[in-house]
Image (cartoon, helix red, strand yellow):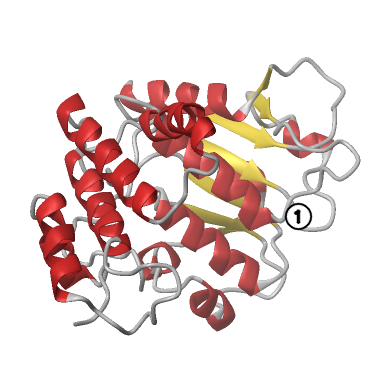
């Protein structure tokens, strides 16, 4: 599967996910997949409509077999949460009562802190059609609700589990802006390299009659410099651009694109200070 590394240790900790009277095996499987994506492994089912085990659930889990294999089925919600120290109930509707109401970020941090303290925790998710009954919410310590469109607030059960699983994972990061991998480290190039690119571009555009009328050339150059200095190009990016600009020197207006003039090519390569040669293998110059 794309993005899956079977050589790494499977994360399998954190709060239990409890599905109350889930109806479709496919939804249970997608819940298991969402849990595995973010390191949760304990799935409890309360009176699943189609019984258990369920092959449709395993198929929809997309290889999250460790979650499916570990499923425990209970007859009642009270039994499912009997060994828990702290329970959250998810709901999209405002409920009567005295329960604290948390957003998903706050809920994730609360679960993380309690997990670190050795407490057993669980998150309750209701039926696909209408969620949890009030008496089921009453078994929880607090409510979790998501900031969704009030005119269309109902979430698919797997989506709801995915959101809470993500907040659980994020709460354990040293930096909540962390990503699975990073882009290359590309510090800005020295100004000398950027000025060389601008001079090269000016000469190439002048040779092709770009600056017309001549009286407007200073202003056009100012605009060009403003555009080219905004991105903060790295050395590698400037080399790519020098290769592109060098290719402009191969041709003049009206010349066939397939033609290459040796003297013009030699001049372009020299002006690019070798950058064009570096780009040839990357498909950034005309074929010779």
Question: As drawn, is 134 to the left or to the right of 89?
Answer: right
In the rendered image, which quarter contains the N terminus? bottom left
- Where does label 1 land, which residue? 127
Residue 67, x across and y down, in percent: 41, 62
Task: Estimate how packed mark 1 is, as few (under 14), some (14 to 19) or many (20 or more) residues with alpha carbons within 10 Å.
Answer: some
Q: Is residue 75 above or below residue 260?
A: above
Residue 140, x across and y down, in percent: 65, 30
Q: Is residue 167 above or below residue 203?
A: above
Residue at the image position 70 percent from the left and 34 percent from the top:
146
Which quarter of the figure has residue 94? Answer: top right
- The outermost residue toward the right is 151
Residue 230, x across and y down, in percent: 41, 28
Looking at this view, is 39 or 14 the one in front? 39
Which quarter of the figure has residue 256? Answer: bottom left
In the rendered image, which quarter contains the C terminus? bottom left
Does residue 218 show up? yes
Residue at the image position 14 percent from the left and 75 percent from the top:
262
Residue at the image position 38 percent from the left and 70 percent from the top:
65
Question: As drawn, is 35 to the left or to the right of 250?
Answer: right
Residue at the image position 82 percent from the left and 38 percent from the top:
149
Q: Is residue 150 above or below residue 263?
A: above
Q: Secondary structure at mark 1?
A: loop
């Amino acid at each position: 599967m794309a993005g899956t590394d079977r050589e790494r240790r499977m994360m399998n900790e954190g709060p239990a996910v409890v599905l109350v009277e889930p109806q479709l095996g496919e939804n249970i499987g997608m819940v298991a997949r969402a849990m595995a994506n973010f390191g949760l492994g304990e799935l409890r089912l309360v009176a699943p409509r189609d019984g258990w085990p369920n092959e449709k659930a395993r198929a929809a889990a997309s290889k999250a077999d460790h979650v499916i294999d570990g499923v425990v089925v209970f007859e009642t919600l009270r039994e499912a949460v009997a060994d828990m120290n702290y329970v959250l109930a998810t709901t999209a509707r405002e409920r009567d009562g005295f329960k604290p109401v948390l957003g998903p970020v706050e809920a994730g941090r609360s679960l993380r802190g309690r997990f670190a303290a050795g407490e057993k925790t669980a998150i309750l998710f209701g039926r696909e059609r209408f969620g949890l009954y009030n008496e089921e919410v009453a078994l929880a310590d607090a409510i979790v609700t998501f900031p969704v469109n009030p005119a269309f607030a109902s979430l698919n059960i797997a989506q709801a589990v995915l959101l809470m699983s993500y907040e659980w994972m994020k709460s354990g990061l040293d930096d909540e802006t962390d990503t699975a991998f990073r882009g290359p480290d590309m510090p800005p190039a020295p100004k000398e390299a950027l000025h060389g690119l601008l001079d090269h571009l000016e000469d190439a555009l002048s040779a092709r009659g770009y600056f017309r009328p001549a009286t407007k050339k200073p202003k056009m150059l100012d605009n060009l410099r403003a555009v080219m200095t905004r991105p903060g190009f790295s050395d590698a990016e400037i080399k790519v651009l020098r290769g592109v600009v060098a290719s402009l020197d191969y041709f003049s207006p009206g010349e066939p694109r397939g033609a290459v003039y040796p003297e013009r090519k030699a001049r372009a390569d020299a002006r690019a200070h070798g950058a064009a040669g570096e780009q040839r293998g990357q498909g950034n110059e005309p074929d010779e």
